[in-house]
Each structure stands twice: as structure tokens, then as C-alpha cells.
């Protein structure tokens, strides 16, 4: 993913509406729905966005260029985002602003402990909150003009991105029910459900997490999740 806003306007008034103009944001996020929200937030703010969906992909990106802002989801398919945050916080030269991202509020402490400058909780919807989080942590020499937050706007990601996330989970559940895979599914769905305000899905994901911690059988809960996922996919098909 590599986007800039084609409707950007020149001059001070345009820059005040797009205070992140000229910055590059690398988003490390495996959820298409959450990544779509971040794409819209960056575009409205004037920033260029690139996306990686795993630690491996993110490290590949970072070998080629250094973004102005790094946003890392803490739950990724090949490990914890705290690993990458810690690596980048200690690297020299350091990325100017590193932010953790998660649908689990308790993850903020882990992100900050790893070296993040701040934390973005899911769901991501407020344009003003997003801009404020970044501008307050950016060195002033990266900004062409003093920080200024424009009017707030609520972002609504494309629901088809949510369907893509459901298809991703369906594929995983079809391939295996390995314990580590179920842990990833539970974590992934917690974040997606929070972003989409899907209480039933969030409850099922939280239940799966708890059952896995207790070492109890997961059959009925996994089946419930599979049914919810299929239902969400069918609802998404009607939008196509």
C-alpha cells in the first residue's frame, strides 16, 4: 500500500487541513479493516502511507527506507509487534515517532515499555485524535509549519475490508486448529471486532482467549467463531 491524497491543495490553508503533508507513515497491521482506517486517516492528513502485514514484511520495508512515523500493531502473525518497536527504538538513526497499536487496552503498557512514543487504541475513527497523537510526538524540524489540527472527521473504513478479514480467518480455521494458530485467531478477531464494533464477535474471541488460557476444550467456541465468521462473510457478499 502506498497512497497520497490526489486532492491535496497547495498553500497554508491546504496544509492546515493536512498537517502531516510530506511525511511517510509505515503501518504494520495484519487486519485489512484496521489498515483501511489508517489509510483514510493518513490520506486526510496529507501523509503517504505504506503497509506491512507482518514483522518479516516490515523489516524488509525498513531495510529500504526510513519512514517519518512507524505504527505497529502488537499482535502480528509471526510474532509480537513489541519486538519491532524495541528494535526500532534502539536503532540509530531512530525513526522520529513510533506508535503501538492494539484493540487491547492493556497492550499500551507493553508498547511503551518496548520504547514506543505513544499508543493508538482501536477502533481508529477520529481524524483529530490521530493527528494530535502524531503531531505532539514529531520533532518540529520535520514540520514545514507549526502543528495545527483541522476540523475533526469520523472515518468509516470500507466494510468489504472487514469481509476480507473474515475470509482470512475462515481460511486459517479451515487449514488447522493448532493451539498457537487459535491464539492468533483470537487476538486477530479481538482487534477486528473492536474496530468494527461487533460485540458478538468480540465476545466469542474473548471467550476463546480465556478457554485457551485455562487449557479447556475449544471445540464449541471454535465452532461458534467459525459460524460467526461465515455469517459476516455472507453479509459482506451482499455488498459486492
Image (tube, rainbow, N blue to C red):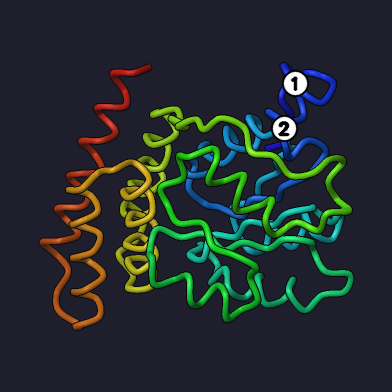
- Please rate how many residues cluster around mark 1, counting C-alpha atoms within 10 Å: few if below 14, some from 14 to 19, many from 20: some
Question: Is residue 196 shown left or right of residue 78?
Answer: left
Question: Is residue 107 shown left or right of residue 39?
Answer: left
**Mark 2 to mark 1: distance in Å?**
7 Å
Residue at image location 63% in from the left, 64% down from the top: 55
Residue at image location 67% in from the left, 77% down from the top: 86
Residue at image location 45% in from the left, 32% down from the top: 154
Please, is residue 16 above or below residue 227 in the view? Answer: above
Between discs 2 and 1, the one toward the N terminus:
1
Residue at image location 77% in from the left, 79% down from the top: 90
Which quarter of the figure has residue 107? bottom left
Which quarter of the figure has residue 115? bottom right
Please, is residue 171 above or below residue 219 in the view? Answer: above
Return the residue at label 1.
8
Nearer-the-camera pick, 201 or 113? 113
Callouts 2 and 1 close, C-beta under 8 Å:
yes
Please, is residue 35 above or below residue 161 in the view? Answer: below
Nearer-the-camera pick, 1 or 105? 105
- Please rate how many residues cluster around mark 2, counting C-alpha atoms within 10 Å: few if below 14, some from 14 to 19, many from 20: many
Say which quadrant the N terminus sits in: top right
Q: Give coordinates of residue 108: x percent, y percent.
A: 48, 70
Nearer-the-camera pick, 31 or 69? 69
Q: Give coordinates of residue 189: x percent, y percent.
A: 33, 54
Q: Give coordinates of residue 217: x percent, y percent.
A: 14, 74
Quick one: SS at disc 2?
loop
Residue 46, disc? 2
Q: Give coordinates of residue 40: x percent, y percent.
A: 57, 32
Amino acid at each position: 500500500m502506498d497512497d497520497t491524497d490526489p486532492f491535496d491543495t497547495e498553500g497554508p490553508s491546504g496544509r492546515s487541513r493536512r498537517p502531516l503533508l510530506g511525511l511517510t507513515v509505515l503501518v504494520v497491521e495484519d487486519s485489512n479493516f484496521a489498515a483501511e482506517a489508517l489509510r483514510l486517516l493518513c490520506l486526510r492528513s496529507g501523509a503517504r502511507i505504506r503497509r506491512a502485514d507482518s514483522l518479516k514484511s516490515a523489516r524488509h520495508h525498513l531495510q529500504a527506507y526510513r519512514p517519518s512515523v512507524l505504527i505497529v500493531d502488537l499482535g502480528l502473525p509471526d510474532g509480537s509487534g513489541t519486538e519491532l518497536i524495541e528494535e526500532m527504538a534502539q536503532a540509530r538513526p531512530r525513526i522520529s515517532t513510533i506508535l503501538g497499536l492494539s484493540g487491547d487496552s492493556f497492550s499500551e503498557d507493553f508498547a511503551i515499555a518496548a520504547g514506543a512514543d505513544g499508543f493508538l487504541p482501536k477502533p481508529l475513527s477520529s481524524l483529530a485524535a490521530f493527528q494530535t497523537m502524531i503531531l505532539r510526538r514529531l520533532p518540529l524540524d520535520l514540520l514545514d509549519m507549526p502543528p495545527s489540527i483541522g476540523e475533526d472527521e469520523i472515518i468509516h473504513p470500507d466494510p468489504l475490508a472487514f469481509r476480507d478479514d473474515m475470509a482470512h480467518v475462515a481460511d486459517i480455521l479451515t487449514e488447522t486448529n493448532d493451539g498457537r494458530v487459535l491464539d492468533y485467531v483470537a487476538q486477530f478477531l479481538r482487534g477486528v471486532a473492536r474496530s468494527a464494533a461487533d460485540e458478538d464477535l468480540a465476545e466469542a474471541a474473548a471467550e476463546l482467549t480465556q478457554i485457551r488460557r485455562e487449557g479447556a476444550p475449544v471445540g464449541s467456541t471454535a465452532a461458534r467463531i467459525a459460524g460467526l465468521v461465515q455469517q459476516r462473510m455472507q453479509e459482506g457478499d451482499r455488498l459486492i
